[in-house]
Amino acid sequence: MQFKYAQLMDVDVESLTNTKLLNFIDEWWATRYRYGGTTKKGIDCSSLTGTLLRDVYGVTVPRTAREQYRISTKLKREELAEGDFVFFNTRGGVSHVGIYLTNGYFVHSSVHSGVVISSLDESYYSKKYIGGGRPNLQQETPVTEE
């Protein structure tokens, strides 16, 4: 499986070490897009990012792309790392989101293709790209009784 994704993203096989992430992508691959969808019968972009972050990294994030943008630490493209959000303006404001993988590639639920890996360098996505974000993982300090 690593070989398949290494070829797709033009990286060395050895660089793809997160098999949990690759297995997640493989399980959801080509699941059709459905606005508001949350299952393998159909999933939208923000539900995919939330499910991926929960299942692969144990991180819970808000449900919509706009909320995910709001709670994230903003990043420049060169700062992106595996597991970061990538945000797009496809319908006005933050309206599409994916998860960055490596080498300019991200996984997302596309309206036309379902769950796929695309490149930030593709003409459509490079024009619509808003920026990256890292889920804010700071946890509140619990209050202790004395």
Image: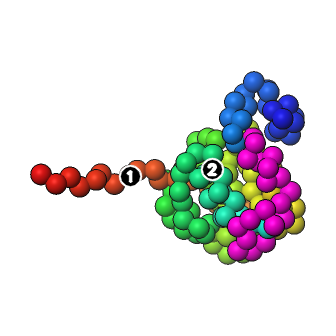
Disc 1, SS: loop
Q: Quadrant of the N terminus?
A: top right
Residue 108: percent from the left, percent from the top? 75, 57
Picture residue at 66% right of the left edge, 52% below the top: 52
Side of 35 relative to 84 (left or right): right
* Camera-side mark, 2 or 1: 2
Identify the disc placed on residue 139: 1
Residue 11: percent from the left, percent from the top? 79, 31
Picture residue at 58% right of the left edge, 45% below the top: 57
Q: Which residue is mark 2?
A: 55
Q: Is residue 38 above or below residue 99?
A: below
Picture residue at 69% right of the left edge, 56% below the top: 98
Find out whether residue 40 is within the magenta segment. yes
Circle 2 Cα neighbour tier, 10 Å, few/some/many (<14 / 14–19 / ≥20) = some
Q: Nearer the viewer, residue 32 or 129?
A: 32
The region drawn magenta spans 22-41
Kind of residue sitting beneath label 1: Gln
Picture residue at 79% right of the left edge, 27% below the top: 13
